Amino acid sequence: MRHFEHFPPGTAYELGATLLTGDDIIEYARAWDPMPFHLDPEAARRSAFGGLVASGWHTGAVVMGQFVRALLADSACQGSYGMDEVRFLAPVRPGDELRGRATVEEAAPHPRRPGTGTVRFLVEAVNQEGTAVYRMRTRLLFACARPVDAAHRAASEPS
Amino acid sequence: MRHFEHFPPGTAYELGATLLTGDDIIEYARAWDPMPFHLDPEAARRSAFGGLVASGWHTGAVVMGQFVRALLADSACQGSYGMDEVRFLAPVRPGDELRGRATVEEAAPHPRRPGTGTVRFLVEAVNQEGTAVYRMRTRLLFACARPVDAAHRAASEPS
């Protein structure tokens, strides 16, 4: 099981690939984001997108699912503080395959919770042509493998 | 239909209320975010949360759905650039009712796309006790009601 110590900055993880069909896009939109250009091929054709596009939340959820299945579900992750700089970089259309990747940008022992540390990941996804379609940063809390880590805690004190 | 001009800064919109059952939380987790503490009541009891909690992505999707149904679906919204400062402020547990609100923070004509403007919303949600559980900012693109808006475009030029 992966703990805080197992995510050194610079490490990158390939998260897998997911194909999005038109039906997937419409089903997600109906439940969570019923904008006409996510839901209705005809309305989408008349929209600025010129055709059906996936909800950005759908893209984000697909990539989060890849991240969890590839890396987090079998880890000592204790939750997320949230996300920053979530960007929908290019439209995701029926038949696109999303390929996620997560890169450790920062790892620091938690200043007030001994035995835990936060890891900031850059999460990105490209489509089958290699075009970047999605990006975000997220900070996750992990338990440390060693319950008390004096060296790490000392390092986290303000100098 | 609401266009760019109909979102003056300071305007706040109540987005409605959604009850999350334990089954809702588990069903979302199974599809999109299968962390043990979102998926398995027994594993959740042993986790730092002490019981089942909703995926932050679930909370976000519920509130996005409220935002779309209350305001965006019948608007001239042409899509989103993404989100910033997405924060999961407190755990969402089975039986919690999420009540969303969106406040216009900024509205500006698009500098390069005549006839459109971007609106930045602060989106927040509280539970049934009024505790803030979720917050994010998002920037959306809207068509203007008037196709050409010289005054707005002039205002957007760098001085």
Image (cartoon, coloured by chain):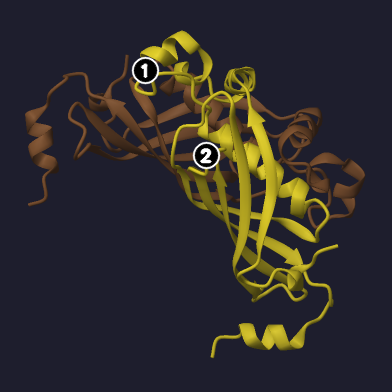
Chain colours: A brown, B yellow
Residue A129 visible? no
The mark closer to the camera, 1 or 2, is 2
Going by the numbered disc 2, the residue's amino acid type is: Glu
Measured from the top left, where is residue B107 in percent x and y? 63, 71
Q: Say which chain tag 1 marks.
A: B
Please, is residue B17 above or below residue B150 in the view?
A: above
Measured from the top left, where is residue A127 in percent x and y? 62, 38
Residue B5 visible? yes
Quarter holding the N terminus of chain B is bottom right
- Give the residue pinned by disc 2: B129
Could you say which is closer to the camera, residue A1 or residue B28? Answer: B28
Please, is residue B132 above or below residue A24 in the view?
A: below
Going by the numbered disc 1, the residue's amino acid type is: Ser
- Give the residue pinned by disc 1: B47
Callouts 1 and 2 in the same chain? yes
Is residue B92 rendered to the left or right of residue A81? right
Quarter holding the C terminus of chain B is bottom right
Q: Which image quarter: residue A154?
A: top left
Q: Secondary structure at mark 1?
A: loop
Measured from the top left, where is residue B12 in percent x and y? 64, 62
Give the CA distance from mark 1 to mark 2: 24 Å
Please, is residue B17 above or below residue A69 in the view?
A: below
Q: Residues within 10 Å of mark 2 (few under 14, many from 20)?
A: few
Is residue A97 rendered to the left or right of residue B137? right
Q: Which image quarter: residue B105?
A: bottom right
Q: Secondary structure at mark 2?
A: loop
Q: Say which chain tag 2 marks.
A: B
